[in-house]
Image (tube, rainbow, N blue to C red):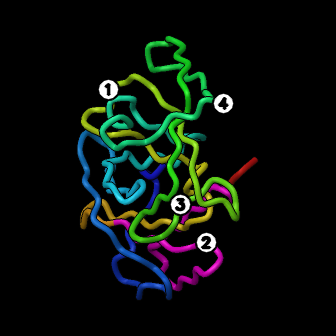
Amino acid sequence: MLSGLAGFASAAEPPGAVTIPVGVSGGRCFVSVSFDGRPARMILDTGAARSLITRAAALPLGLPFDRWVDTTVCDAGGRLQTHPNAVVAAASLGGIALYQRPGARSLSLAVARVDLGGADGLLGSDVLHHLTLWLDVQAARLTLTAAKTLTSSSDQAISYSPAAHAG
């Protein structure tokens, strides 16, 4: 989860890093993600194993549903839902490509009928695994870079790379 991340306030931005605005509301961090060139408001959730998009958002975004792959999701109320996955041909966060597997450009997102408080979905570690993230909640910004190019000399910056923390 991002709540344990410190700010990236005093250190110089590492090469290749991008800083984007973050909306913070109700203890959640919201970022704008590009799905096939269209913006989507997503919750940044590094504690989630899978990313998902709401069915209500997938339709206006024009994301096609996969006729061969579906995902069963257990919602917060304990109810199981099974829906075809949404296919995203290209996705990016701050101009950095998001992917689930190296070499793959498309995403297969779980779809659920849930109310995420105005968010179109959530980004989980399946698409964040190749990034290192710094969250500065007070400044409402997120700095991100590909994990392999990261260098930091700041005592205050805590980097998070979900792939490095996999059990």
Label 1 CA crowd tier, 10 Å (few <14, some 14–19, many 20+): few
Label 4 CA crowd tier, 10 Å (few <14, some 14–19, many 20+): few
- In the rendered image, which residue does mark 4 sit on? 68
**Disc 2 residue type?**
Ala
- In the rendered image, which residue does mark 1 sit on? 115
How far from the left and from the top, in percent, is residue 151? 58, 83
Say whether marks 3 and 4 touch (CB < 8 Å): no
Residue nearest the observer in this picture, 54 or 50: 54
The span picked out in magenta is: 142-163
**Disc 3 residue type?**
Leu
Alpha carbons under labels 1 and 4: distance apart? 26 Å
Q: Can residue 67 be seen from the camera position used here?
A: yes
- In the rendered image, which residue does mark 2 sit on? 147
Say whether marks 4 and 2 touch (CB < 8 Å): no
- In the rendered image, which residue does mark 3 sit on? 98
User: Residue at (59%, 22%) from the top-left corner?
Assistant: 72
Q: Relative to residue 44, is residue 97 depicted above or below?
A: below
* Magenta-span inclusion, residue 127: no
